[in-house]
Amino acid sequence: MSPIVSVHHDPQTKIDFITLSNDCLSATFLNFGARFYAFFTPDKYGKSENICLSLATPQDILNDPAQFGAFIGPVAGRIKEARWQDVHLEKNHGSHHIHGGSQGWSNQFWEYAFTTTDGHAEVTFSLNDEHSGYPGPIAVKTTYTLTTKAVIMKTTCTTKKKTIVNPTNHVYFNLSGNTKEDITKHQLQIQAAERLELDGEQLPTGKMLPVKGTGYDFQEPTFLDEVLTTLENGLDDAYCLKQIQPAIVLTHPTSGRQLRIHTNRQAVVVFSTTGFDLPLPLSEQQTMRSQLGIALETQELPDVINHPHFGAIELLPGEQKVFQTTYEIELQHD
């Protein structure tokens, strides 16, 4: 079939569910937080199932405490002491700032428009951010394009005043389909030889640690259960990516699904949801529990503003930053 777009509006929450579909794949996005809500892909037997963790109801989404599929910004991760130069940001994580604050991009309603072309359907979300507390306003557009093999996420940012931007998407994946299993039988490969050293508050120390020979080494495909049994707190770590694509590969051998992530971003934060037992109802009559999903958050290194040797995330008037991550689906047959 030709690509199609359908929209379901929930009048109580004002959330719109925008679904892009073609012969092979279907993906749903939301105007609240420009969320990547669901991604239906076939397994090796041709059965199409959701490979995202999706909250069950619109009200659950509106009250989401864990950014399920949310587009995080202006800056993902923690900012130490909630301060950049002379700008004081909201302290929404102890004495620190995290994920753009309570009025960040994930908690705002975005405008959107959609189009279809030969083989592709896309939705573009637009936001003029004047509410997060960051200098600006920051104009951001995020386009999700559905092809026959992938979702392509492309973001552009401009600003009226000097500011900082380091967005990410916080989608949780589970390739078993409809959360039939947890993630422990998934294989993960990351093109990264180093990860960030973190202190007791999960803030970067400024040092990079080699992963070779440690439980954090995913340079070769590695089953997650081999790692998570040795890491009491699981994975919540930032990896500095090599310039090799795909940068990240997640595989579920039983279903044959493989997620290949291509990105122009500097890093990926891997969160295994270990210990993440929350009374959050998910689709498929599941409740959120430890290691039910894995977040693979492509971004620049966290708290880079306090460690300039890692790079820079400043955005100047007249400048445009462009970020792109592709979530490509492949099938591995026996």
Image (cartoon, helix red, strand yellow):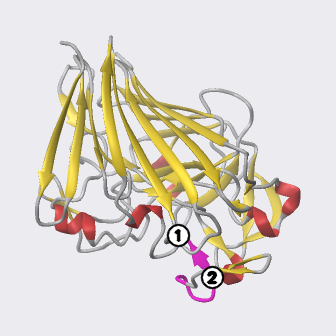
**Residue 314 in picture, x, y percent from top left:** 75, 57
**Residue 306 in picture, x, y percent from top left:** 80, 70
- Is residue 131 highlighted in magenta? no
Start-end of magenta stretch:
92-98
Q: Main secondary structure of the magenta part?
A: loop
**Residue 201 in picture, x, y percent from top left:** 64, 80
Q: Examine the rendered structure and indicate whether residue 174 appears above or below residue 57.
A: above
- Is residue 97 highlighted in magenta? yes
Q: Quadrant of residue 22?
A: top left
- Identify residue type, mark 2: His
Q: Nearer the viewer, residue 296 or 257?
A: 296
| SS at badge 1 | loop
Would residue 265 be found to the left or right of residue 65 on screen?
right
Kindly identify which residue carries mark 2.
96
Which badge, 2 or 1, is on the more N-terminal residue?
Answer: 2
- Identify residue type, mark 1: Asn
- How packed mark 1 is, by other alpha carbons closer than 10 Å (few <14, some 14-19, many 20 or more), is few
Would residue 106 be found to the left or right of residue 129 on screen?
left
Would residue 34 be found to the left or right of residue 40 on screen?
right
Q: Residue at x 20, y 20 (%)?
A: 46
Res. 65 in view: yes
Residue 233 badge? 1
Q: Nearer the viewer, residue 186 or 78?
A: 78
Q: Quadrant of residue 190?
A: top right
